[in-house]
Amino acid sequence: MNLLRPGQAGYADEITGFQTAVATAPAAVVAAESAEDVVAAVRYAAGHGLSVAVQATGHGLTAGTDGVLISTRRMTGVEIDPGARTARVEAGARWEAVIEAAGEHGLAPLSGSSPDVGVVGYTLSGGFGLMARRYGRAADHVRALDVVTADGELRRAEPGSDLFWALRGGRDGFGVVTAIEFALLPVRELYGGSLTFDSADVPAVLRAWRTWSAAAPDTLTTSLALIQYPDLPMVPAPVRGRHVAQVRIAYLGENGDDVVAPLRAAAPALADTLRTMPFTESGSIAAEPRQPHGYHGTNATVSQLNDAMLDAVLEHAGPGAAAPPVLIIDRLGGALARTPETPGVGWDSSAEFVVRALSVVDGDGVADVRRAHAKLFDALAPWTTGRLLPFVYGEHAPEEVAESVFPAADLRRLRELKQRYDAGNVFRAG
């Protein structure tokens, strides 16, 4: 077990992640290379009365820790079984590695918009991806989990066990997942990309997308983003300095151009990247940033998307808003509204859309961001039905998050299982 303390070479590198707005100063960092290292780290923490948190690859910590931080970024193994259409992935692997390996066999995982995200954290949060309306959440396709529990034992969690249920959507607080096995889908390519519209057309595009997406087939997963691009040389000329509406599309059916024709007719596009592409290029649809930065975000699931709600979105996140976040509205429904074969922790499956806001933060700026976000979500409150765990970014009060993202019955069961598997609250970071 490679244990590092503050001031030692390598310590700073291990605690640095994509999310720079979550400060952490652990008493020790374990640079794990195997499940055995994770076992040793958990036993060390328990023996010294320290809490445990995990820094994987991808988008990193959701809360800081002063205990033991287990860094799993060296655990990057990916194994594909093309016959069984499954993948076995270690704790530090990113989606891009799985996408490439599965793609060699004409298969695809239920990955998200960014291939840079870590597989395990994304999946344990629920996993809302590019094919969600067709196949549901990534958590619903997990076959098995290897997890080190608070007693320092490496266990295999499989369908039928309480631990298997809790980890798939409950995310953390029950152990350190060292490997995960999940199903792959027979998808080689999709029709995808984005349509980007100028500031003046944002109101019309919002309404056109709402109408169009409401009738979308389950084979189509789509979102609409409002983005204020900075006026900087590295930003592409068509969007530089503009506040745009960007419709993002991942479609698994036929005749993609015919399906999106109503959107193309809504307004002239600044950019149109829609095309048939191999799934291995699906990260280009949203083209999310890969450089580390600080950010804070939240979301709300909603029962509808009426004119009053769109007016609130425009006021607080559209062109002319005082402090516009990156605002994304995702169309839900389809497979997301159906009960999976092996349910995990529940979520708001009856919602029609989720509205999410994300803002870059520096230093003490998170307080201003919280206030700006509150104005938007207060305006949406009459139609709000809940919140989704995958889109809660930065540091939030754990109790408040739990009560807003989990159904009441599931939350009671999660708390009971927490007492069974971690009565000493070793995994308290989440």
Image (tube, grey):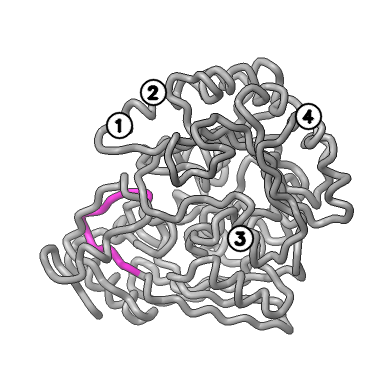
In front here: 39 or 8? 8
Q: Amino acid at mark 2?
A: Arg
Dot 1 and dot 2 residues touching (CB under 8 Å): no
> Which badge, 2 or 4, comes first in the chain's sequence?
4
- Which residue, given by chain and number where applicable, does mark 3 sit on? 111
Q: Please give the label number shown on residue 266.
A: 4
Q: Say few, some or many: other residues with alpha carbon within 10 Å of mark 1 (under 14 / 14 to 19 / 20 or more).
A: some
Residue 239 occupies quadrant: top right
Label 2, label 3: how many angstroms apart (C-alpha)? 32 Å
Label 4, label 1: how many angstroms apart (C-alpha)? 37 Å
Q: Amino acid at mark 3?
A: Ser
> Which badge, 2 or 3, comes first in the chain's sequence?
3
> Which badge, 3 or 1, comes first in the chain's sequence?
3
Q: Say few, some or many: other residues with alpha carbon within 10 Å of mark 2 (under 14 / 14 to 19 / 20 or more).
A: few
Q: Report helix, strand or loop for mark 2.
A: helix
Q: Report helix, strand or loop for mark 1.
A: loop
> Which badge, 4 or 3, comes first in the chain's sequence?
3
- Which residue, given by chain and number where applicable, does mark 1 sit on? 365
> Which badge, 1 or 2, comes first in the chain's sequence?
1
Q: Amino acid at mark 1?
A: Gly
Q: Amino acid at mark 4?
A: Ala
Q: Who's the residue at 54% across and 35% down the image?
A: 356
Dot 4 and dot 3 residues touching (CB under 8 Å): no
Foreground disc of the pair 2, 4: 4
Label 2, label 4: how many angstroms apart (C-alpha)? 33 Å
In front here: 23 or 20? 20
Determine whether 81 is above or below 5 in the image: below
- Which residue, given by chain and number where applicable, does mark 2 sit on? 371
Q: What range is drawn magenta here?
A: 62-71
Q: Who's the residue at 56% across and 21% down the image?
A: 381
